[in-house]
Image (tube, grey):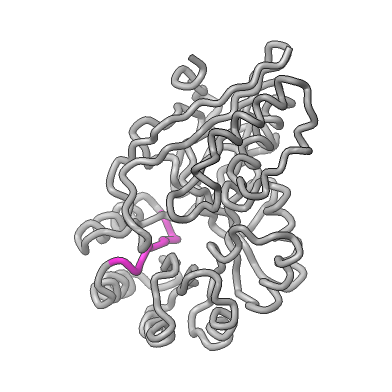
């Protein structure tokens, strides 16, 4: 007998998480819980306000539709989730978990055995100068060699001062600096700002301008002194347009976020297209709780990308779901000694 349901959890951030799109204090996430023959599979459906394309008006209605179809032994492949990429990801991973006997071990590997960790970047959120510098030195003291700074929400001169101070103490051989502008720069000043930032040996910058300006982004990729990464630009793009995006813009890197792109299959299609065009990639979580982060991390490990991944978000929340995931020496590990605790969900 099948029994599917969904539940929701408001995740409480440990500090105001600032980006150029606004500040998050908490984040609502949903979970699909699929039961069959005494086994339980759980998948996380995570959206980000002002970024995810999922319709919030019809979100719970679509979750109910998925549950009803599962409970009636319907063909889940027939449900249209094109406009609900987070639900597509949640359903995909819940079914994988069910097929793995509810073990949460979706991609068995040296990672899930606790033998190897995944190198990750240290994420620095926007805030005032003191707050950002405090985060930077915390990350460096924790052993991170790759720091990712959210920029674009405070005074640009202050951001330059913060980055300059890092470079005065650490060369690019010691600390790799990635930047994420979340589309903050305007077409009028983007090249000038990129030129100023390039003085500090920046590894890359994500989405310097807002998505949807394909011709301008393509021109930036030709002229920018800093390698450009596409992130938001990939959200909501259908299969037929993926090749056009990569060929037209020709970025140096793309970032893959399964919750925003519609799951692993969609993300792997982006990888195939990117690699065919010599575009490099890495994987980033999208503020998921530990259930979604666990699935993404396991998938990232088996893909064997040589770059530091963006998978350090599990420590953001006061009330995250207890899990075996842990960070040690700037690597994400699956600790065999720790257990999952689903008491907050399975009630």
Percent position of residue 9, x then y: 43, 30
Decide whether residue 22 is among the magenta residues: no
Asked if one can make out residue 46 in the rendered structure from this viewpoint, the answer is: yes
- One can see residue 293 in this view: no
Residue at 50% x, 45% y is: 47
Residue 150 covered by magenta stretch: yes
Residue at 63 percent across and 41 percent down: it is 89
Q: Is residue 275 left or right of residue 232?
A: right
Q: Is residue 202 above or below residue 121?
A: below
* Residue lying farthest to the left in this orientation: 130
x then y, percent, for residue 81:
67, 44
Horizontal and vertical percent for residue 163? 32, 72
Would you place residue 159 above or below residue 67 in this image? below
| Residue 60 or residue 166, whichever sits in front | 60
Task: Pinpoint residue 48: horizontal percent, then vertical percent.
Answer: 46, 48
**Which residue is at the front of the view, 326 or 271?**
271
Number of dots carrying numbers: 0
Q: Please state if 264 lies on the left or on the right of 129 as rendered.
A: right
Residue 123: name its quadrant: bottom left
Left or right? Give the position of 345 relative to 126.
right
On the rendered image, what quadrant is the N terminus found in?
top right
Which segment is the magenta one? 144-153
**Residue at 70% over, 20% down:** 71
Q: Image point 25% across, 72% down: which residue?
A: 155
């Amino acid at each position: 007998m099948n029994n599917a349901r969904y539940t929701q959890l408001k995740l409480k951030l440990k500090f105001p998480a600032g980006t150029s799109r606004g500040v998050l204090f908490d984040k609502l996430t949903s979970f699909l819980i699929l039961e069959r023959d005494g086994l339980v599979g759980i998948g996380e459906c995570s959206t980000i306000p002002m970024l995810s394309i999922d319709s919030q008006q019809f979100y719970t209605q679509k979750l109910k539709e998925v549950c009803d179809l599962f409970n009636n032994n319907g063909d889940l492949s027939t449900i249209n989730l094109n406009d609900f990429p987070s639900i597509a990801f949640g359903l995909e991973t819940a079914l994988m978990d069910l097929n793995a006997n509810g073990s949460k071990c979706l991609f068995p590997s040296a990672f899930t055995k606790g033998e190897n960790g995944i190198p990750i970047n240290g994420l620095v959120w926007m805030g005032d100068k003191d707050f950002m510098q405090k985060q930077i030195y915390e990350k460096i003291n924790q052993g991170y060699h790759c720091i990712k700074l959210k920029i674009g929400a405070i005074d640009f001169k202050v951001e330059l001062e913060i980055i300059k101070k890092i470079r005065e103490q650490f060369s690019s051989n010691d600390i790799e600096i990635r930047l994420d502008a979340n589309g903050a720069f305007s077409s009028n000043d983007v090249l000038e700002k990129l030129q100023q930032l390039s003085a500090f040996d920046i590894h890359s910058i994500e989405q310097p301008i807002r998505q949807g300006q394909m011709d301008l982004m393509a021109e930036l990729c030709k002229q920018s002194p800093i390698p450009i990464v596409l992130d938001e630009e990939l959200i909501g793009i259908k299969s037929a347009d993926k090749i056009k995006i990569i060929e037209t813009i020709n970025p140096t890197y793309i970032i893959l976020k399964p919750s925003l792109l519609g799951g692993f299959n969609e993300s792997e299609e982006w990888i195939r297209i990117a690699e065919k065009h010599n575009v490099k990639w890495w994987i980033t979580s999208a503020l998921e709780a530990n259930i979604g982060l666990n699935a993404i991390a396991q998938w990232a490990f088996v893909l064997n990308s040589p770059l530091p991944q963006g998978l350090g978000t599990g420590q953001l929340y006061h009330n995250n779901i207890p899990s075996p995931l842990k960070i040690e020496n700037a690597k994400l590990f699956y600790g065999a000694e720790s257990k999952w605790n689903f008491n907050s969900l399975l009630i």
